[in-house]
Amino acid sequence: MKCKKCGTKASVNMRQHKLALCKEHYLEWVPEQAERFIKKYDMFSHGDRILVAVSGGKDSLSLWDILVRLGYQADGLYIGLGIVGGFGYSSESHRLAAKFADERRLTLHVLDVEAEYGQPIPVMSDISHRGQGKPCAVCGLTKRHVMNRIARDRGYDVLATGHNLDDEAAVLFGNTLRWSGEFLLRQGPVLPEVSGMARKVKPLCRFYEREMTAYALLRGLEYIYEECPFAEGSTSIYYKEALNRLENDRPGTKLTFYLRFLEARQQGLFAQQADARQGLHLCTNCGQPTSAPGLCSFCRMMYKVHGEIEIP
Ligand code: Q46
Ligand code: ZN
Ligand code: ZN
């Protein structure tokens, strides 16, 4: 395979785009594409302050790298979940996120869940009995709460996460299997700002996971290869594998699935549901939007964990 731009040996062959590129042109192509998506979906502009949620993995570090290369004002947020696993998942991912920031003199905010809320994620999960023996429900809820809170308290305009196409297609697949109208309506590259919550964007949502792996490797980024030990056996991995089988036989399936969904939604497929973020009110304890009356799910969980509330 030859690079389409210069004719030298290609490093990355993207069957889904019928495009092969050498290292140099691939490392130019990715940020160009990202910029195109940022503009197309009106995610943010150069005047905005962006907070990137960084896990130490390839996607979030690549996202941060790309945004900085494109000249955006992007700071990072690392959330210490207190997940030990066999190799110290949280401490290793924290080390790599901090190293990335230090080497580039970027600002990384760090919030340690145990220091801030009294218990690490796995213990919170045990106490609150949420999520059938896996800490992922508590983890997701806590991460969302913390990201919203830091973005709001530190005055960021936008919160950016590193979800790639494989992540988004797997979520879409799950939501479609259940026809979860409300979730389908909320899934997209941009969730607009509502009072108490910054705009949320996913600039990598049109990049295949393997495209991000190739970017991180060719760019020489040091990231955590291992998944969180609790990811094993998850439904989302199961959906990803199923979609990969379709993709293998018919390159481009995942992208078409996701893009056609966005088009259908734009054309009003779920219009009668209006804006899913409307009808929310503010949690009486922390002030973040919630659909439940009174306390939001996070504050109710903290009440179970501590038997009292007044948590920021
Ligand atoms: S970090 Fe948290 Fe994931 Fe680990 S505990 Fe589950 S949700 S698997 S993205
Ligand atoms: Zn080339
Ligand atoms: Zn709350």
Image (cartoon, grey):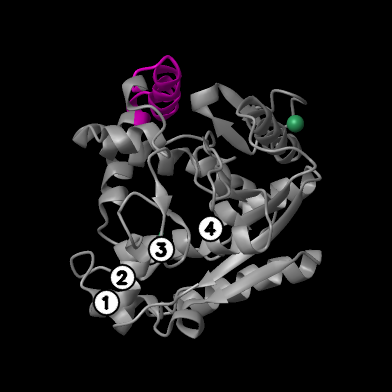
Residue stretch in magenta: 247-270
Q: Is residue 136 visible?
A: no
Where residue 30 appears, x then y in whole percent? 67, 37
Cα gap from disc 3 to disc 4, whole angstroms: 16 Å
Disc 1 element:
helix
Within the image, what quadrant is residue 120 found in? bottom left
Cα gap from disc 4 to disc 2, whole angstroms: 17 Å
**For the residue marked with disc 3, what is the amino acid?**
Thr
The earlier-in-sequence mark between 4 and 2 is 4
Identify the residue position indicated by label 4 in the image: 148
**Toward the viewer: 302 or 33?**
302
**Toward the viewer: 219 or 38?**
38
Cα gap from disc 1 to disc 3, whole angstroms: 16 Å
Identify the residue position indicated by label 3 in the image: 284
Cα gap from disc 2 to disc 1, whole angstroms: 5 Å
Identify the residue position indicated by label 2 in the image: 301
Disc 3 element:
loop
Decide if ligand 3 comes within 8 Å of the CB at mark 3. yes
Q: Nearer the viewer, mark 3 or mark 4?
A: 3
The earlier-in-sequence mark between 3 and 2 is 3
Identify the residue position indicated by label 1 in the image: 304
Disc 4 element:
helix
